[in-house]
Image (spheres, grey):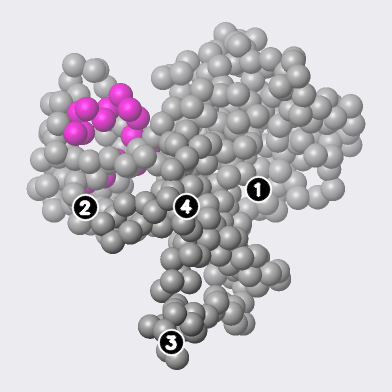
Amino acid sequence: MAYAVYGGVCLISPDPIGPRNEREQVWGAFRAFADAHGWTTSVMGAGEDWLPTYRDSGMHNIYLGDEAVVRVQDFSLAGKHMKGLRQAHNRIKKYGYTVTFHDPSHVDPALVGELTDLMRLSRQGEHERGFSMMLGRIFDPRDAGLLLTVVRTPEGSAAAMCQFVPSTGINGYSLDLMRRDPGDHPNGLLDFALCSTIEHLAARGFEGLSLNFAAMRSTLAGEKGDGTMQRAERWFLKRLSNFAQIESLWKFNAKYEPEWLPRYVVFDTAEHLVPVVMAILRAESLWEIPVLGRLLAAGAEKRMLAAQADTDEFLSSIVPWDEDGMQVPGATMADRDDAADRDDSGTGVPPPDVVAGPTAVRDGS
C-alpha cells in the first residue's frame, strides 16, 4: 500500500499491489489501520479492476479520466490516420536531431548537469510537482531499471528529455517526466522522443507504454452522450482548458491511438469529497501553480470576455425545464429569460432591480 497523508486525508495511489486472492483482506486491514489513526481514506487513480473491492467496503467512486497506454508491438506510423504524427517525427529527424537512451541511475555527471538545466528552463517553480503520476525525483541511484530518453540537436546539445518508470502491469514503461527546451526548435520534439521510445521498447520485446493521464477524456470525446448535462460538462472543460492542459493533453495522447484505461477517485461518503479534493490538490501541488497570476496576465481579460460570450451562446441554446422538471420542446433558455423579464403588463421591460446582460469584467478579475 503506497499512501501519503494530507490534512487528515490518507491518499492511496496506485491501487494496492499484491496477489488477487488477498485483496479483501489487505484492503480491510488497511482500512482498520487508517481508522485507528482517524484518517479519511481515498484512492486516487483507481483502476476498474479494484472498484468491486472498494464498493464492497462501502466506498464510492467518481470518474476522473483515462490513462493512455500505447501497445508498442502494434504501433506504426504508417497510414493516412497517422500522417500528422509521422510528419512531426520525420521533420525532426530530417533536421538532424538524434535520440539516445540511458539508465538515469547511472549517467555521467556532465549529462546530469545538462538535463537539470533543461528541466529548470521548462518548469514552473523550483521543484517538480506531482503525486499519483510522477515519481518526483530523477538521477537517484535507488531507482534502478528506469529509462531516460534524450533528444539532441544537430550541434549536440540536449533539446528534450523523457523519463519512464517500469510498469509490470503492462509489461513496459510509464511516462514519468517530459521536458523540452523552450528555445527555437522545429515542431515535434516530444513526438520524436516518444515515437523513438516506442520503437526502442518494441525492439526489446516490451508491450506497453503509458503516456499522459487525460482528465475527463470520455466527457470531452462525447462518449457519455449528447444531452444537456453532457454538453454543459464539455463546455465547462473546454473553457477550463484555456488555463489548464485538459483538452490539449487528451488530443496529444489521442494521436498515438492508445488504449484508454479509465481511472477513478474513490472516497467514503459525500461529506468527505471536498476534503479529499483539497488533499489531492495539495498532493499534486496544483494549488501552488499561480493560476490567478495567469488569469491576470496579458490577454487574460480578452480570454475572459470571449469565454463570457461563449457562455451566453451556450446557455441560449439549452432547452429549459418547466416547473415540473420537464424539458420544454421548441423553447430555449433565452425564451425563458425573456419571459421572466416581462412585467405583469407584458411589456418586456425588466424590473428596476434587474441588470440586463452579463456583468462586465473589471480589472481582469
Name which quarter of the figure residue 296 lies in: bottom right
| Secondary structure state at the residue bearing disc 2 | helix
Is residue 47 located in the magenta-colored stretch of the structure?
yes
- Residue that appears at 27% across and 27% down: 50
Q: Mark 1 vs mark 3: which is more N-terminal? A: 1
Tell me how far mark 3 sits from mark 2, CA to CA: 39 Å
| Secondary structure state at the residue bearing disc 1 | helix
Name which quarter of the figure residue 309 lies in: bottom right
Q: Nearer the viewer, mark 3 or mark 2?
A: 3
- Residue that appears at 13% across and 51% down: 37
- Label 2 Cα crowd, 10 Å radius (few <14 / some 14-19 / many 20+): few
Q: Amino acid at mark 3?
A: Pro
Q: Nearer the viewer, mark 1 or mark 4?
A: 4
Give the residues drawn in magenta, as a range. 41-55
- Residue that appears at 33% across and 34% down: 46
The residue where tag 2 is placed is 270
Q: Mark 3 vs mark 4: which is more N-terminal? A: 4
Mark identifier at residue 351: 3
Residue 67: image x %, image y %? 47, 32
The residue where tag 4 is placed is 330
